Image: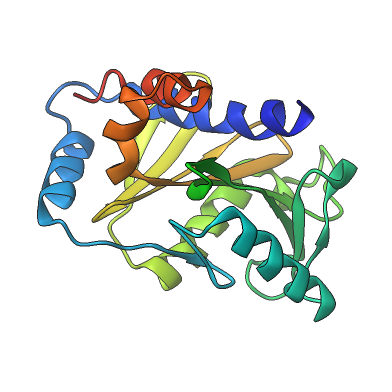
């Protein structure tokens, strides 16, 4: 239950941020264009990908743990990776995927700068989100668009083929990046599972 609460909420928030786009917005045009291309971008990070079977994900993480590349995250409900040089300051990223039919279709990732304090603005979540954006532009390419949200501030969204990436702030401390396989949307909306209901709440205003 803790895992569901921790990782489903950022996905819902990401959906609400995107739902703030008006009909016919730049985001919606980008989404329709990319999905129509039928090109797939399944790569996530560290050898993890959309469609990766749950069993393979656990085995892969076990191997990465043996190599000292990752460790168990908070309360043993997530996977934690230390970021030493990727961002402007040392940070951690925690992640754990959402599965549909025992395959990865969504990956929420939570970032935190080490040594954060309320008075150290360099380590604030808005700077952290901007730094994650800079890093991701190097990995996944340019093309992120800026979306304004009344409660979450500035968010950044990019769609390549089936892969959507949303970057946003959670609070003063944390920033999130949520990877979503948009080609799974119809299957989830047609599903009566909890995952299907959650995904419908995220995407209901994007038709």
x 78%, y 29%: residue: 2
* Quadrant of the rendered image containing residue 5: top right
| Left or right: where 35 falls relative to 149 | left
Quadrant in which the C terminus appears: top left
x 52%, y 39%: residue: 168
Residue 82 x/y as whole percent = 77, 66
x 86%, y 45%: residue: 74
x 61%, y 64%: residue: 56
| Left or right: where 12 falls relative to 63 | left
Q: Between residue 130 and residue 58, name the one nearer to us.
A: 58
* Quadrant of the rendered image containing residue 108: top right
Q: Between residue 149 and residue 45, name the one nearer to us.
A: 45
Q: Between residue 29 and residue 64, name the one nearer to us.
A: 64
| Left or right: where 94 falls relative to 16 | right
* Residue 184 vertical placement versus 49 (above, below): above
| Left or right: where 136 falls relative to 115 | left
Quadrant in which the N terminus appears: top right
Residue 69 x/y as whole percent = 77, 75
Residue that extends furthest to the bottom in the rendered view of this protein: 67
* Residue 11 vertical placement versus 159 (above, below): above
Q: What colouring method underlies this structural image?
A: rainbow
* Residue 19 vertical placement versus 139 (above, below): above
Residue 147 x/y as whole percent = 35, 35
Residue 102 x/y as whole percent = 53, 46
Q: How many marks?
A: 0
* Quadrant of the rendered image containing residue 202: top left
């Amino acid at each position: 239950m803790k895992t569901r609460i921790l990782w489903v909420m950022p996905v819902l928030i990401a959906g609400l941020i995107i739902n703030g786009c008006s009909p016919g917005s730049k985001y919606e045009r980008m989404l329709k264009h990319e999905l129509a291309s039928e090109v797939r971008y399944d790569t996530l990070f560290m050898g993890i990908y959309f469609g990766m079977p749950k069993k393979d994900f656990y085995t892969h993480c076990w191997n990465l743990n043996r190599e000292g590349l990752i460790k168990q995250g908070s309360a043993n409900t997530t996977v934690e990776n230390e970021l030493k040089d990727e961002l402007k300051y040392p940070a951690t990223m925690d992640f754990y995927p959402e599965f549909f039919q025992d395959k990865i279709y969504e990956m929420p990732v939570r970032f935190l700068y080490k040594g954060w304090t309320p008075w150290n603005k360099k380590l604030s979540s808005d700077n952290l989100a901007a730094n994650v954006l800079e890093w991701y532009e190097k990995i996944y390419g340019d093309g992120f668009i800026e979306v304004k949200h009344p409660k979450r501030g500035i968010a950044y969204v990019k769609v390549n083929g089936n892969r959507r990436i949303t970057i946003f702030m959670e609070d003063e401390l944390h920033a999130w990046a949520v990877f979503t396989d948009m080609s799974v949307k119809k299957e989830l909306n047609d599903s009566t599972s909890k995952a299907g209901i959650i995904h419908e709440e995220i995407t209901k205003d994007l038709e």
